[in-house]
Amino acid sequence: MRVIENFDYNWLFGRYGLQADGSKIEEPAAVQDVSFNDSCWKQLDLPHDWAVEGPFRTDLEGFTGKLPWRGIGWYRKHFKVDKTDIGKRFYLDFDGAMAHAEVWLNGKKVGGHPYGYTSFRVDLTPQLSFEGENVVAVRLNTENIGSRWYPGAGIYRHVRLVKTSPVHVDHWGVFVTTPSISDVEAEALVHVQVRNHLSVPVKGHYSVSVYELYADNQTGRKVASSSHVRLDLPANATAQDSVSLRILSPKRWSLEATNRYLARVKVYDGKYLVDTYEVPFGFRTIQFTHDNGFLLNGKRVQIQGTCNHHDLGALGTAINMVALERQLKILKSFGCNALRTSHNIPAPELLELADKMGFLVMDEAFDCWREGKQSGDYGSLFDEWHEKDLKALVCRDRNHPSVILWSTGNEVSEQYHPELGIARHLTEVVHRYDKTRPVTFGASYPSKSAMNGTELQVDVHGMNYAAGVYGGPDFYGEFLNKEGHEHLSGFSSESSSTMSSRGEYFPRKFHVSSYDLNEPGWGGLPDQEFAALDRYPAICGEFVWTGFDYLGEPTPFNSDKTVLLNHAAAVSKEELKKQEEELKKIEQNRPTSRSSYFGIVDLAGFPKDRYYLYQSRWRPDYPMVHILPHWNWEDKNGKNVPVFVYSSGDEVELFLNDRSLGKKFKQPYEYRFRWDSVCYESGELKAIAYKDGKKWAEKHVRTTGKPVKLKLTPDKTVLKSDGEDLIFVRVSILDADGNEVPTAEPVITSSVSGPGVIVATDNGDPTCLIPFHEPERPAFNGLYLAIVKARKGSEGKLRLRVEADGLGKEEIVFQIQNEGLEKRYLLTD
Ligand code: GAL
């Protein structure tokens, strides 16, 4: 029978080649051999990102986060297997390893995978010893890879040991489709591929049962079961078949009710049950329409999406379910309902959370095709690997109801060359493994790729930065109305790219103002996209660049040509030259920025003002009003300080020290209430919002007094010691009346006593080069974040103490709960 074991713990790690400080250590020979002496290597648990500890180095590229991720990393793990398992198959499943993974067992190469974002399996069976110890060795090499963002480095996702009988469901071998769904009944068509590792043929069979599946992954009622399906398995080969099940009164999966089911497949070798394999799935229909946007279960749902890179801020790229769930909760809180996994295959946890929390997913494979954007990027792997990588992506993720679109790429140069047919070829590769979802890619020159025919090689037109295209008079209409285009539909695969630093309004050096009126040449403001979508409701919605700030690409302070390169093919020579000149000027100023400014939320997870602008549009029924900026402008007495208000109401009245500054109504195609000239005086700004003439929401901001103390706001107080759980503690600074001081930037130190650690701290400042694991850093515009973890398997209490000069100290005690180690294996492989 199948046993899936966590294989994350007790690895040894050695780093060679480029070191964190820029020096080099020669890689020794035969590190893969059992006899290699690894006794002084560092012991650690996976997932592991070897570069996030830094240090940040000003000589390193801003676009990959100024972190020393280039190097050669070796991981070794010594383990034993039980003699009672002789005869079984043993696999290691890697959810992803950055990058160019090569895997050995007991000195013999057993597999690997170059693209760091792909999940892959290696078969350990032939090399496995049941006598003594086994040594698995993994070599990763990031020295020559190219990336336009921080890629991370290391075995940064989970690893599982999968033990099966010789006859078992193949890797990603079950695919459930739902050909018909009504309120009365639905069909689940379960496709099963079984592998026979025996050197004799097997006359086997399988059966499938379907259960209700709860959010905690427990199964409920059985709702259907199949009879036995015969499967003749040739020796050392696979065989496959499908079985159809009828489910009465199916509960559909939707964004509001994330009903899921579980298909349990049982495989028999003729006599005995030899494998059980479980796959969660859901019943929902999706349609991208020509005239009416995107339909989920027949109803129009506006895609209110964000693009995100895969890092988890101060935690780097090492996947952590708790940190990812926190990100998704924050996205949900401002109404985001869709995620684009820009521009790579995500961790499987993202799909699991999206299914459970109710997000739509645009599941993306690559940032480029054959024509790379940088040396060592996917362009160098494309020819040999794209079919295997697409297969891995689709076969792994195709049972998730959240996935509504496959994306084969982003801003690829091949969009200008339809004659190459690469878009068509990739679409066909994807449809080999899943015909139930459309294929798209993010076009950086959407009008061109539409008119030159490239878009006819994909199913749905993904348009990057296209508000001017479909919002304007009427290019997109022309494209849609063209003969032969009647079936096409489109959406904004990337929008906005507005830049800002949280809490900065008259920005300091290397910061961008949070009035949110700054976008790069190719981008736009949120308002422009909203207006375009309002004018052209046939478009399915947008994916904003980005939900969160991320490590790397600190446009406009890139100090390199990354972003420029990305668009080089689309702009004129003169424009390119002009932009290069500007970049040179920026370079001379040596910006220290290591993370982006694009986020609606900053790197630490604190909302920027833009969060409320999106919330006002994306959650129209949620009564809210938000005022910016803060009201601490001692140096601006009598001077103009513009005030913006974001509200889901349709009318706002603003008061300064109880004097009305007038009422404003939301005008068509306007999304902010703006008082562009307000003569500053200290005191209180108050906004009262109305909707349909009735009071809807009220908010004030006050000039605060001096900082006097710290305030700790944890996101929970009970911490599991399962090796994964985290508590995120927001630290703010209060005045004597208990108001948060938005400008305070004291140096804050945190420490813990008890069985736990401070894993990282942050403040959301893209220019801060203090390594994330340092517990001491200044607050940035009034906020600081500490991330706390309990020691694996511990019990008792963990005390967090946070202090700053002149502000005293604050403490908080967390209860540690020991419920065993987090298994973190998925229901399926
Ligand atoms: C886009 C690109 C993204 C990111 C963004 C920054 O053109 O697709 O990956 O670079 O620009 O604005």
Image: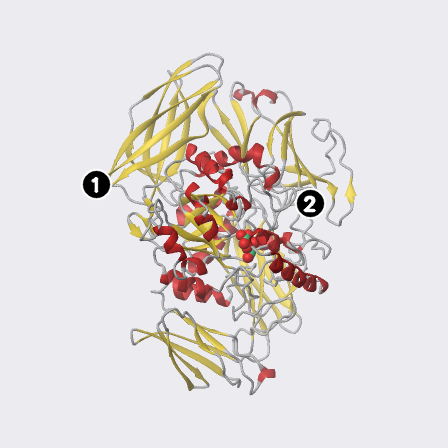
Q: Residues within 10 Å of mark 2 (few under 14, many from 20)?
A: many
- Residue 230 falls in which quadrant of the image? top left
Which quadrant of the rendered structure holds the N terminus?
Answer: top left
Q: Amino acid at mark 2?
A: Arg
Image spot of residue 353 (x, y percent): 44, 47
Image spot of residue 349 (x, y percent): 48, 44
Provide the secondary structure element on which disc 2 rests.
loop
* Residue 759 appears in the picture as rendered: no
Q: Is mark 1 within 8 Å of ligand 1?
A: no
- Which label sits in the foreground, 1 or 2? 2
Image spot of residue 109 (x, y percent): 64, 26
> So how many labels did they put on this image?
2
Q: Residues within 10 Å of mark 1 (few under 14, many from 20)?
A: few
Residue 789 is left or right of residue 488, and the answer is: right
Report the residue marked by disc 2.
Answer: 70
* Residue 470 appears in the picture as rendered: yes
Residue 593, labelled with which disc? Answer: none
Residue 318 is left or right of residue 659, and the answer is: right
Residue 184, labelled with which disc? Answer: 1
Give the mark nearer the N terminus: 1 vs 2.
2
Q: Ligand 1 falls in which quarter?
A: bottom right
Quote the CA–CA distance across marks 1 and 2.
Answer: 56 Å
Image spot of residue 614 (x, y percent): 43, 63
Viewer-side residue, 210 vs 469: 469
Viewer-side residue, 720 vs 773: 773
Q: Is residue 631 above or below residue 389?
A: below
Provide the secondary structure element on which disc 1 rests.
loop
Viewer-side residue, 140 vs 480: 480
Q: Amino acid at mark 1?
A: Val
Q: State the residue at coordinates (43%, 45%).
A: 455
